[in-house]
Structure formats: C-alpha cells, structure tokens
Image (cartoon, rainbow, N blue to C red):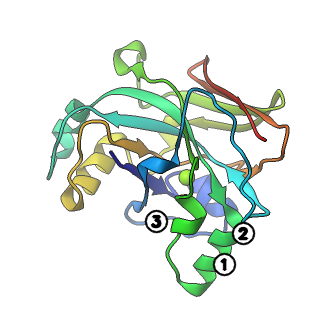
C-alpha cells in the first residue's frame, strides 16, 4: 500500500507557512514504513530539531481505480480516520529553499500516525466535519472539512489521473492552521466529530 498526502489544502495553513494558495493539489508520498498505528508512541528522531504535528482527515481507498471521475469518486472510499503527518520542518524548510524533494522531511519511519477507521455512513455530512488536536489537554488545531480547498472527490479524481489507487491506500487530506513542534512527554489526542480516535505519547 501507499500513502498519498495533500499539502496546503487549507488556506489558513498555507498562509501560516508563507506558502501560496495552490491552484491544484500539492501531492507527496510516504512509504508504508511510515505508518504508526494503534496509538503507539512516536519517538522523536535524532536527525531533526523541529518535528511538527499536522492533524489530518484520512481516506482509506476501498477499491482499485484509475482515471476516476469526480462524480464517482465517493465509491472509492468507505471509511475515514484521523492521522498526524509528522514533518521535520527544519529539513523541509532547507529542502524547499534549495528546491529539493521533501521525502527526508515527510516520509521517514513512523511519520504517518493513523487512527482506526470509521465507516463514512456514521457521519451525517463528510463535508462538514469538525476535527481537533489537543496536546496535553490544550486545543492546538481545530479544523472543519468544509474549509478544504480541494474536496475528497476532487483529490481522488486528480491523483488517479497520475497514480493508480489501490485498495488499502491512504490519502492524508491536508492540515488546518495551528501546526507546531512536538516535545518529549507530549500527549496528542485527536478527535473527529467529537469522537477521540488518536491518543498517544511523544517520546
Ligand atoms: Mg500535511
């Protein structure tokens, strides 16, 4: 399986990192070795002094598809969850300045923390879902999926023009504003529509 992530899908987050609002989705990949699940702790790697949290809604692809029309895209995911797109911001900043790819900042081991997944029917409106991240009981990120620049269905349509989606692939759909650094001892809690899906420690 593969993990496809969308960058800059919330305008306020693009702005906080001084990035332009994109005209089309910004895409990057993480390998399957990036997955961190079952609320296991995240260990801060020694190659970065500035690991950031980015809370995101995740789609789990339910069937293979290529060239998926936007109007049929919702048939390709049946479950959603929450994840943290851990980012070595110091490495990313350096690579952005040099025009280099982001993999060392985004694709390292355990950089894709994922929750369990919830059937989409359990939500009344996927396009209006609140999600939030608390660190040590303080709210740090609050998002609503209505603020996404590119919808789930458009993202699937767009990615599948270039890359075949397969059952089990995950799509991280972008983070709202409020990203920041994690520290040893932090407890991260992620809620989706009022239900806690993430709860793990930084070590
Ligand atoms: Mg992200």
Residue marked by disc 2: 90
Viewer-side label of 1, 3: 1
CA distance separating discs 1 and 3: 20 Å
Residue marked by disc 1: 94
What SS does tag 3 mark?
Answer: loop
CA distance separating discs 2 and 1: 6 Å
User: Considering the image in quadrants, where does the C terminus appear?
Assistant: top right
The disc, 2 or 3, on the residue closer to the chain's N-terminal end is: 3
Query: In the rendered view, does 72 fall on the left or right side of 130?
Result: left
Residue 153 placement (x, y as % from top left):
29, 42
Residue 116 placement (x, y as % from top left):
49, 24
User: Considering the image in quadrants, where does the N terminus appear?
Assistant: top left
Residue 25 placement (x, y as % from top left):
39, 60
Mark 2 vs 1: CB contact within 8 A: yes
Which residue corresponds to the image point at 23% horizontal and 43% vertical from the top-left?
A: 166
Residue marked by disc 3: 22
Does residue 99 sit above or below 42 in this rendering? below
């Amino acid at each position: 399986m593969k993990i496809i992530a969308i960058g800059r899908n919330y305008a306020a987050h693009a702005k906080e990192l001084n990035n332009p609002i994109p005209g089309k989705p910004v895409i990057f990949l993480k390998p399957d070795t990036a997955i961190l699940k079952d609320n296991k702790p995240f260990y801060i790697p020694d190659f970065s002094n500035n690991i950031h949290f980015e809370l995101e809604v995740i789609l789990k692809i339910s069937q293979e598809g290529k060239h998926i029309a936007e109007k049929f895209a919702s048939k390709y995911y049946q479950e959603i969850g929450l994840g943290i797109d851990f980012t070595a911001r110091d490495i990313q900043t350096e690579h952005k300045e040099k025009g280099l790819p982001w993999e060392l900042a985004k694709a390292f081991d355990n950089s894709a923390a994922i929750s369990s997944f919830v059937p989409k029917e359990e939500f009344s409106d996927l396009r209006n879902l609140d999600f939030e991240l608390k660190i040590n009981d303080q709210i740090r990120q609050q998002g609503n999926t209505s603020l996404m620049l590119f919808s789930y269905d458009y993202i699937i349509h767009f990615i599948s023009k270039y890359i075949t989606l397969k059952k089990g692939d995950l799509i991280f759909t972008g983070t709202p504003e409020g990203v920041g650094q994690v520290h040893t001892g932090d407890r991260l809690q992620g809620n989706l529509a009022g239900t806690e899906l993430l709860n793990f420690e930084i070590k």
